[in-house]
Image (cartoon, grey):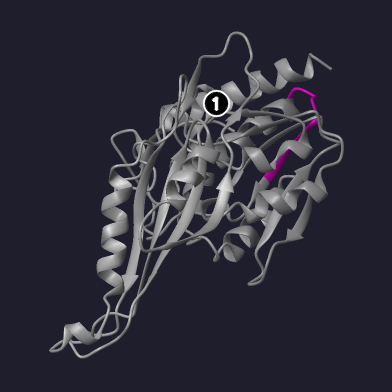
Amino acid sequence: MDSVAIVRLARALVDIDSTTGREAEACDWLAGHLRGLGYAVTEQPVGGARRRNLLATLDAPAVVLSTHVDCVPPFFPSREAGGRLHGRGSCDAKGILAAQVAAVERLRASGERRVGLLFVVGEERGSDGARASATLAGGSRFIVNGEPTDNRLAAATRGVLRVRLRASGRAAHSSMPELGESAIEKLVDALVALRGLDLPSDPRLGRTHYTVGLVEGGVAPNVIPPSAEADVNFRTAGDVGALRAALAALPSVSVEEVIEVPPVTMTTVAGFETAVFPFTTDVPFLTAWGETLLLGPGSVAVAHTGDEHVAIAELARAADLCARLARTLLARL
């Protein structure tokens, strides 16, 4: 597979809407494509709506290349301009997927069959596909996960602690606020207090930071709001226990943990550029597949944006790097 074939495969996938929960059509197409190339494809159901992971093998794999099929919303289709592939998933992570397929095809053409491909669903909303994939693991020694790292090997990534802050009040007519109790004002007080927390840090990963991603509350403009909640996503570094203690002290709200993914340190290989990254991946849930590595084309700075794109030259280089990395790992066995 040359760069033209890589882009063709990536565009075919980008043009299928596979926002999280809607991966079935993309998995249908990809399973058929991989079988057409001669792979044995195992399909593993994950939840409902015909969502499933795909494992493509030649012989029993010692090295597995993996990434995710799902994307964040909103969907928008592919286009090429200025040496770049644009579209939802072009960078995160369908371009990566195409480069991984190209890498394994090159290895196969050289006679190497101890490599496989694992493509999972649900990475963007809790990693349910990666969690389920452990039951498919069958003796591989290394797994190279694909995320946008500018084609550098990741030495470490941050974790996630996603929480839901809930405030309760009492409904009343807005003309008589003294009879009610505003849940929204309580939630605002907690969010203001959140700004002042001393968040944990790590010498390598930096300071924990957060985003208030969703806020909901109230029933009507002329009703004192009886309930309100906010989803807050922390990108964790350092002592998560200290973060939990700080959250427990927030005024006027309850704190529900939605998901936790720990910070991780990964395998690196001499001769490959390395870096640490602020994002979180499926890697903590892929350890059943062997030692974990992380590498992929594209920049997280444009992932999840309205101008998501990846340089076509980076896709081609990623295929070369993944093939070289797999050979290096296989030589260790």
**Residue 315: x percent and y percent?**
48, 31
Q: Which residues are magenta?
A: 110-118
Displayed quadrant of residue 144: top right
- Does the magenta portion include 111? yes
Residue in the foreground of this view, choosing between 60 and 129: 129
Residue in the foreground of this view, choosing between 109 and 315: 315
| Residue depicted at x 56% and y 53% | 259
**Residue 158: x percent and y percent?**
50, 34
The extreme front residue here reads 178
Q: Is residue 14 above or below residue 166?
A: above
For label 1, the SS is: strand
The three-letter amino acid code for the residue at tag 1 is Ala
Q: Is residue 198 visible?
A: yes
Residue in the foreground of this view, choosing between 135 and 233: 233
Q: Is residue 137 left or right of residue 229?
A: right
**Residue 284: x percent and y percent?**
65, 39
Q: Quadrant of the C terminus?
A: top right
Q: Is residue 159 above or below residue 69?
A: above
Q: Is residue 281 above or below residue 270?
A: below
| Residue depicted at x 58% and y 21% | 321
Q: Is residue 221 visible?
A: no
Q: Is residue 31 above or below residue 166?
A: above
Q: Quadrant of the N terminus?
A: top right
The extreme left residue here reads 175
| Residue depicted at x 64% and y 56% | 128
Residue in the foreground of this view, choosing between 323 and 143: 143
| Residue depicted at x 19% and y 83% | 178
Q: Is residue 222 left or right of residue 228?
A: left
**Residue 120: x percent and y percent?**
64, 50
* Residue identified by numbered label 1: 156
**How many numbered marks, from 0 up?**
1
